[in-house]
Image (spheres, rainbow, N blue to C red):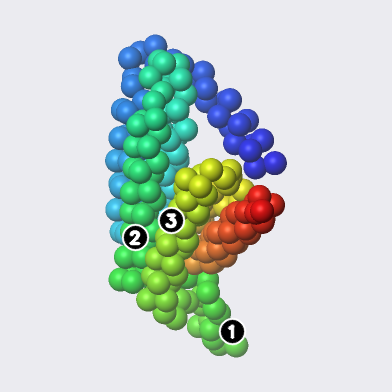
Amino acid sequence: MTETWKERGRSWFRPLGTALARRGVRPDHLTYAGLGLSLLAALLLARGDFLSAAIVLGLSGLCDMLDGDVARATGTASTFGAFLDSTLDRIGEGALFAGLAHYFYTRASGGSIWFRGNLEGSARWGDPDGQTLAVLSLATLILAFLVSYTRARAEGLGLECKVGIMERPERLLTLAAGALLGPRFLPGVLGILFLLTLVTVLQRVYHVRRLTRSTAP
């Protein structure tokens, strides 16, 4: 099911990738542009400019989607290109969660984590501890890296490991959705992101365990 919507989304933008290839755009151009946009989105998240961050995140995701299509259209797909793309993806995603952690640590207010004063006329949504949300952002980042690491380690051992409900495209879409919803709901979205990323890590560990059991003498 997950692969189906990803492939459908890619098919919508494939003609754009072909058009860019005809105009001389190289896949590395899109890879570096995607990284630059991710870093810009990270800065916007750190400043609390969530709407702009969501828009820039969408552009970054578009670059990430198109670089492979351009590589295939120009016949320049290579092993190093795939390696570089994955490495820069990790840098960009790390910057995003670091920017979010910076925001929560320094200026978080209005997060919908708890409701206080519900019997008072001054009742409002409030974030009791921005530092906790900053730690949650960094914890989600660690889990995101573990999602990538478990797949890379498994494939290094000759095992296929593409299972999981929260891979990088889903994480970025969820983060962009949280940014669109704004600071009031972003903490809740971050909590969901943390839990589903943790589930993905456990799914991959279990998957590799099952594969190794089936191949054990």
What crowding class fits label 3: few (fewer than 14 Cα within 10 Å), some (14-19), or many (20 or more)?
some
What crowding class fits label 2: few (fewer than 14 Cα within 10 Å), some (14-19), or many (20 or more)?
many
Q: CA distance from mark 3 to mark 2?
A: 13 Å
Up the image or down, 114 lies above or below 35; here it is below
List x then y, in percent, for residue 190. 50, 63
Nearer the camera: disc 1 or disc 3: 3
Q: CA distance from mark 1 to mark 2?
A: 33 Å
List x then y, in percent, for residue 75. 41, 16
Tag of residue 118: 1
Residue placed under numbered mark 3 in the picture: 145
List x then y, in percent, for residue 140. 46, 63
List x then y, in percent, for residue 147. 50, 54
Whether residue 154 is visible here, answered yes or no, is yes
Disc 1 or 2, which lies upstream in sequence? 2
Q: Please give left or right for residue 64 compared with residue 40 in the image.
A: right
Residue placed under numbered mark 2 in the picture: 98
Q: Quadrant of residue 83?
A: top left
Nearer the camera: disc 1 or disc 2: 2
Q: Nearer the viewer, residue 186 or 14?
A: 14
**Residue at (33%, 54%) from the top-left corner?**
95
**Residue at (36%, 54%) from the top-left corner?**
94
Residue furthest out toward the front: 217
Residue furthest out toward the top: 22
Q: CA distance from mark 1 to mark 3?
A: 39 Å
Q: Quadrant of the N terminus?
A: top right
